[in-house]
Image (tube, rainbow, N blue to C red):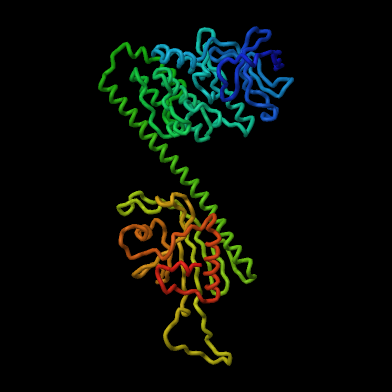
């Protein structure tokens, strides 16, 4: 049997005699030492992972006298290997074993377990457990005690390769853990709420695949706890999505401790029902708010990524222009040569209503920008070479005024094309447009006319071309299209196309 030397003593353990199934952070074997039969936990962590850190959690718990936490007899890195170990007494059974063998517990039994767990959380109030679950609640010396206190934190601190999110037990993971946020005592309160469901309902509140469980923890209203209505309402508070809105450990001790005493006097049935209704409404509102917050975060991330991608595409377009001549004048938003000026607006977030103008928009758009090209008018000389004034008569020509070609760039998807991509489109109008008569012109994606142009509704504004994908494998065509248009503007040849919508060959 392997022998290990830790901070306090030498121990042996039998790798063929596991005490329970392997957990997210380690596995436990039956061992022995000067204290007799012990449980030896080998952490899923090596010295290279931990960078030779002190095992602070073992040192902290090993120095305390604790009544509701499984004692730490020894801890540390084995002197003969790179493994990290904890040595504990062998406990009678786990809460997981108890629930598995019995199905459900009585209210009195579940209350006793919860109060023992809460006493352990209060006893070590400077440490967040982070992985509270039935498998980490062990019966030892006539009471339920917490095991693996803070090991998750030690592992998470010790290596960037193994994080709590990758090792948490899905059925008991709080929303903030799934979001990758820092856990707190409210995280342990949430896990205990899930454990009360397991003890009294026979299963945690959310089950299914890991993805389904994650989605439920983040957004779903937990099912009602069966049995005592006061406890059911309170557990609903423990399972609130926002950590700040959950009850504290002290309040949990107070309320759960009085549950059976309250049963001694009958409660008003109507008031209990009303209180339960309010609790469910609060939970539903919070779940909806959390779902919206999640969508908002996802949307912000999408916009940021899209903005960076478009900036890179425009940057490459600018670089192609700059590379051809020392006479190019450029900035982040515009670039000029000869009579041509290319302008880029920068990316803006777009929020479209789902029922815009009586129907769902054809394009679901999250970000937009404009790219425009101006061909400057031809400046006629005021005097001849000899110095005589020149008088111009006759009809004006397109060269006598500036001409602007505008296009909308948008990051979106549609039912027919469900991939979020950057696309280019432009518009023309039967009547006067907001671009001084120049066509094609750009519109903001949240503009009414933009949506109408891509709907079945008749409108004055129509699509001049596009949408054309401009990113990924289609970027070369986008670059070629705009370099060709810019070349025409530089030499003064760019004018309004003779045909709308613009034929495909015109843009090649």
Residue farthest to the left? 270
> Is 237 rendered above or below residue 367?
above
Image coords of residue 219 (percent x, y): 41, 34
Image coords of residue 10 (percent x, y): 71, 13
Q: How many marks?
A: 0
Residue 186 shows in this picture: no
> Is 226 rendered above or below residue 505?
above
Specify whether 7 is left or right of 274.
Answer: right
Occupied quadrant, residue 39? top right
- Write the residue at 70% across / 16% down: 2
- Write the residue at 52% across / 49% down: 305
Image coords of residue 333 (percent x, y): 54, 62
Residue farthest to the right? 80
- Image quarter hosting the N terminus: top right
Occupied quadrant, residue 251? top left
Specify whether 17 is left or right of 228.
Answer: right
- Write the residue at 58% across / 23% down: 150
Specify whether 401 is left or right of 272.
Answer: right
- Write the residue at 39% across / 34% down: 287
Residue 6 shows in this picture: yes
| Of residues 481 and 319, the one drawn nearer to the viewer in this rendering | 481
Image coords of residue 286 (percent x, y): 39, 34
> Is 433 rendered above or below residue 100?
below
């Amino acid at each position: 049997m392997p022998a290990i030397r830790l901070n306090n003593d030498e121990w042996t353990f039998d790798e063929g005699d596991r005490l329970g199934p392997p957990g997210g952070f380690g596995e436990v074997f039956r061992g022995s030492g000067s204290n007799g039969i012990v449980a030896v936990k080998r952490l899923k962590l090596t010295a290279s992972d931990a960078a030779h850190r002190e095992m602070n959690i073992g040192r902290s718990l090993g120095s305390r006298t604790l009544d509701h936490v499984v004692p730490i007899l020894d801890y540390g890195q084995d002197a003969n290997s790179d493994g990290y170990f904890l040595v504990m007494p062998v406990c009678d059974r786990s809460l997981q074993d108890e629930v598995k063998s019995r199905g459900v517990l009585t209210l009195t039994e579940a209350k006793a377990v919860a109060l023992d767990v809460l006493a352990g959380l209060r006893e070590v109030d400077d440490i967040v457990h982070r992985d509270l679950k039935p498998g980490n609640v062990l019966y030892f010396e006539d009471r339920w005690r917490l095991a693996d206190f803070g090991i998750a934190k030690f592992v998470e601190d010790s290596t960037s390769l193994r994080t709590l999110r990758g090792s948490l037990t899905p059925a008991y993971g709080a929303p903030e853990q799934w979001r990758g946020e820092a856990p707190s005592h409210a995280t342990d309160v949430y896990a205990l709420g899930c454990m009360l469901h397991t003890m009294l309902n026979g299963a945690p509140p959310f089950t299914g695949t890991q993805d389904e469980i994650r989605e439920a923890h983040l957004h779903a209203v937990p099912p009602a706890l069966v049995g005592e209505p006061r406890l059911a309402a309170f557990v609903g508070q423990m399972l609130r999505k926002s950590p700040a809105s959950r009850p504290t450990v002290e309040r949990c001790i107070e309320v759960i401790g009085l549950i059976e005493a309250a049963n001694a006097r009958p409660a008003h049935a109507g008031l209990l029902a009303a209180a339960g209704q309010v609790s469910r409404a609060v939970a539903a509102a919070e779940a909806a708010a959390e779902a919206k917050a999640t969508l908002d975060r996802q949307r912000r991330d999408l916009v940021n990524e899209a903005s960076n991608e478009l900036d890179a595409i425009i940057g490459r377009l600018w670089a192609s222009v700059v590379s051809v001549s020392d006479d190019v004048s450029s900035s982040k938003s515009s670039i000029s040569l000869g009579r041509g000026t290319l302008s880029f607006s920068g990316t803006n977030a777009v929020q479209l209503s789902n029922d815009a103008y009586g129907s769902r928009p054809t394009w679901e758009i999250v970000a937009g920008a404009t790219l425009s090209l101006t061909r400057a008018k031809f400046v006629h000389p005021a005097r001849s070479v000899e110095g005589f004034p020149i008088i111009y008569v006759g009809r004006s020509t397109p060269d006598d005024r500036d001409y602007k070609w505008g296009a909308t760039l948008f990051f979106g998807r549609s039912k027919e094309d469900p991939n979020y991509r950057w696309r280019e489109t432009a518009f023309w109008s039967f009547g006067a447009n907001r671009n001084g008569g120049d066509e094609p012109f750009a519109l903001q994606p949240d503009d009414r006319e933009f949506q109408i142009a891509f709907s079945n509704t008749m409108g004055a504004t129509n699509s001049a071309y596009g949408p054309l994908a401009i990113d990924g494998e289609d970027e070369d065509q986008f670059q070629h299209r705009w370099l060709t248009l810019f070349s025409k503007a530089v030499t003064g040849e760019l004018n309004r196309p003779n045909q709308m919508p613009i034929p495909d060959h015109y843009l090649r």
